[in-house]
Amino acid sequence: MATSDDPSLRLVTAALSDVGRIRQNNEDAFVCEPALGLYAVADGMGGHAGGEVASAMAMASLRRSMAAVPDAGFLAEPSLANRRVLLDFLRQAVLDANADIFARSQREPSLRGMGCTLDVVLVRGRSLFVAHVGDSRIYGLLGGTLYPLTEDHTFGQTLLSGGAMTWEEVQRHPQRNLLMRALGVYPKVEVDTAYLDIAPGDVFLLCSDGVHGLVDDAQLAVALGKHAEFAARTLIDAALDAGGRDNATAVVVQVAACSVCEPIRVGSESVRSVMASASLFADFSAAELLRVQRIAFGRQIKADEVVLQLGQPLDEVYLVIDGTMSVWRDGVQVGWFGPGDPFGAFALHQSDSDVVIKADAPTRLLVFPLDAVLELIQTDTVMGVKLARNTLRRVWQRFLQLSNQLARARNRSDAAQSKKAE
């Protein structure tokens, strides 16, 4: 067990790993170092000692990377740009680990084909940065509810995410657990990254599939509600009691205290629930909702404050978290937005506003810069397709609404002309 030394942030952490009841070697490895703000789990694979070597190399590479972590800017000003610097650093740290493992496997024939999964959490200030490759997982117990913060890079999950199969069909597929991404197998690997703000009471779990494959979500949630050390021990014991057919590793990070958060917490339950109900993010998984928030920031609007002026360039997508916004044209209110409604550049192209939009009451917005959204669409194919599809669907709905309004106006005009003629 360990606690953070930062007076404004107190984390209570614990980590345990067990070889299990079947395996002879433990190919899992972990890092749990509050002094570095670094937590990680790797699950090795490969013949002979290959898996152990790969997971150990991943942990060593991460520790070396921390010597040059560019966190000064973010700690001074946690802006979207400085957030991106740390996300890019974490992604590169994982890519460096991948390159190290692959290079060694090419040099040593006995290690050919070795690799590992990798999940990393980096804590800075009141923020948490995530990197993920493979089928180990990161969970968050947020507001008392357990959420998966990562998505398995398996063939089964690919079929599910792409809509090719239902969950029930995937469970029957013989190759559902086939890994689609892992460190060290190829010269390059795609890395998922995510970001969220943390608050007292949040609990995070990093674990190998020797835990999440044997311990159900209900057991995970109950365990994570206990003290960190007890939670880690409980999870490992539960995996062993369920057969212990694989190495089992659990790293628990509990936020006991941190400085006051912003009015809008990226990754919080209130933001997640609104996004989940919004048509713009229809069919997004919990992990996808988190990944898209890495490019988002919160904005609080006062009553009667104007958010968009007539003719103002639309270069951001806004999502109403709570409150109401009214839409005005030529001094007449023509519409309104409520929780879950997007506006601004929601058609995903830059243009100029043809209306005025202002807050009717104190309102909280989640803001997505358009250039970052377009980049996300290009780099995250599945999520990009979903977002583009939802955007086209909403644009079509707006077109139909405008067409209906125009038809009604024409009918009123025709009726008025007919009455005048009489």
Image (spheres, rainbow, N blue to C red):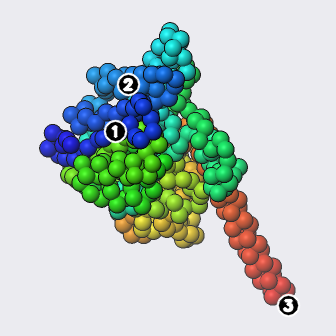
Residue appearing at x 42%, y 38% in the figure = 247
Q: Which mark is in front, 3 or 1?
A: 1
Residue 390, picture quadrant: bottom right
Determine if residue 264 is in view: no
Q: Amino acid at mark 2?
A: Ala
Residue 399, picture quadrant: bottom right
Residue lying farthest top? 107
Residue where numbered disc 2 is placed: 56
Q: Amino acid at mark 3?
A: Glu
Residue appearing at x 25%, y 52% in the figure = 230
Q: Are marks 1 and 2 in contact (CB under 8 Å)?
A: no
Res 52 label = none
Counting residues from the start of the chain, the first of labels 2 and 3 encountered is: 2
Q: Position of residue 251 (x, y in %)?
A: 33, 42
Q: Position of residue 175 (x, y in %)?
A: 65, 41
Residue 124, picture quadrant: top left
Residues at marks 2 and 3, CA–CA distance in whole angstroms: 90 Å
Quadrant assignment for the N terminus = top left
Q: Which mark is in front, 2 or 3?
A: 2
Residue where numbered disc 1 is placed: 17
Residue where numbered disc 3 is placed: 422
